[in-house]
Amino acid sequence: MIAWQDWQFAQPAWFWLLLIWPVLQLLVARWFKKGSPSSQGAVFIHPQIARFFNGQKQAASQADMPSISRLGYGLSFMLKLAILLSLLATLAQPQRLIEQPPQMDSQPVRDIALVIESSVSFVLQDYQLDGQPASRMEVVKSVLDQFIAGLQANRFSIALYAEQAYTLVPMTADSQAVRQNLQRLQPYLAGRTDPAMGEALGLALRELAEPQAGIEKRILVLVSDGLQSQSRIELDAIVDLAQSLNVPIYTIGIGAGSIEADQRVFSGLIYQPIETASLQFLAQHTAGRFYQVGGGDDLAQVLADIERHEGVVRQDTRQARWQTLALYPYPLMLAVGLFLVWWLITLGGRRWN
């Protein structure tokens, strides 16, 4: 249903020209009446223009001037008025406002630094994904991809570690780029063992250290099966740095607590159950939380819980958006059509020969 309040003119001042209509009628009638200066000198108004503005007989030849009845005169007058109104409506630029769905402000409001272990233990298949055995890395990539896709108004970074630590994705609001790089993660990508946990956490905290306008919260999420080797950088130093930056560290423990969860049939790799002490220490001393997940669904629930605890309360600033549809071609075409009708009924069409 179209509401009239959705229609408007961008330049309505053109309608003031309607006041000139009577003045033009008088001027044209004066030029062409008997005894006017037009009979003594040059006439500067074209006869067709004079005929348009003056409905009476003009000082032109009888062949050019039609003899019209009173009904024809009235019709001619109405056509001229309609033509003038159509031209003025065209100049006034009519337009229709079409309401678009409201859009929330999409500016990033939170920085989330992800630290993901990629040691050899992440090849272990002690999870299930869609009913099939899956490695720790496969589950982490699948669930984190959904997590990032569902949080568009955030910035993300990814750091990975094993024997070495790397920043895979610097802090960015391009969630698509983050998701693409997330799929590149593989066990062994940074080595076999995990002594670089502290270094990776330091890289992530450095990404969070630089304040950005509009960012309301900063958090760090560590996804790991715990320390199997001694961290080269003491975790106490990481805790001190996180406290100074006021950044909570949420730790997510990946892997089962016993070898019974190992679903491999043949493998020469020694099963490594989760180590929780280091993960609990980091979370406890930085106002974060520690989670131990037993499957892909548990990991999704953990990420949802982190989102609830660290969610940003935002005011609903949605405003209606309007698309402008120009309508001036319609009154312009109407004016042209009416002019052709007027020209024909005033016998302008006799000038074919």
Image (cartoon, helix red, strand yellow):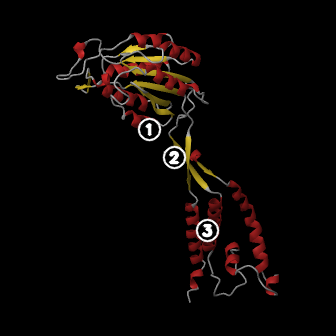
Disc 1 or disc 2, which is closer to the eye?
1
Q: Give x and y (percent) for residue 214.
A: 60, 29
Q: Residue at x 58, y 86 (%)?
A: 351
Mark closer to the chain start, 3 or 1: 3
Q: Give x and y (percent) for residue 149.
A: 42, 32
Q: Residues within 10 Å of mark 1 (few under 14, many from 20)?
A: few
Disc 2 or disc 3, which is closer to the eye?
2
Front one among 6 and 10: 10
Residue 347 in view (yes/no): no
Q: Which residue is mark 3?
A: 79
Residue 248 in view (yes/no): yes
Cα separation between marks 2 and 3: 28 Å
User: Residue 328's mark?
Assistant: none
Mark closer to the chain start, 1 or 2: 2
Amino acid at pointer 2: Ile
Amino acid at pointer 1: Ala
Q: Give x and y (percent) for residue 79.
A: 61, 68
Q: Which residue is mark 2?
A: 2
Cα separation between marks 1 and 2: 42 Å
Q: Give x and y (percent) for residue 14.
A: 70, 58
Q: Which residue is mark 1?
A: 177
Q: Regarding mark 1 in the picture, which secondary structure is present there?
A: helix
Q: Regarding mark 3 in the picture, which secondary structure is present there?
A: helix
Q: Residues within 10 Å of mark 2 (few under 14, many from 20)?
A: few
Q: Residue at x 53, y 43 (%)?
A: 99
Amino acid at pointer 3: Leu
Mark closer to the chain start, 2 or 3: 2
| CB contact under 8 Å: marks 3 and 1 | no
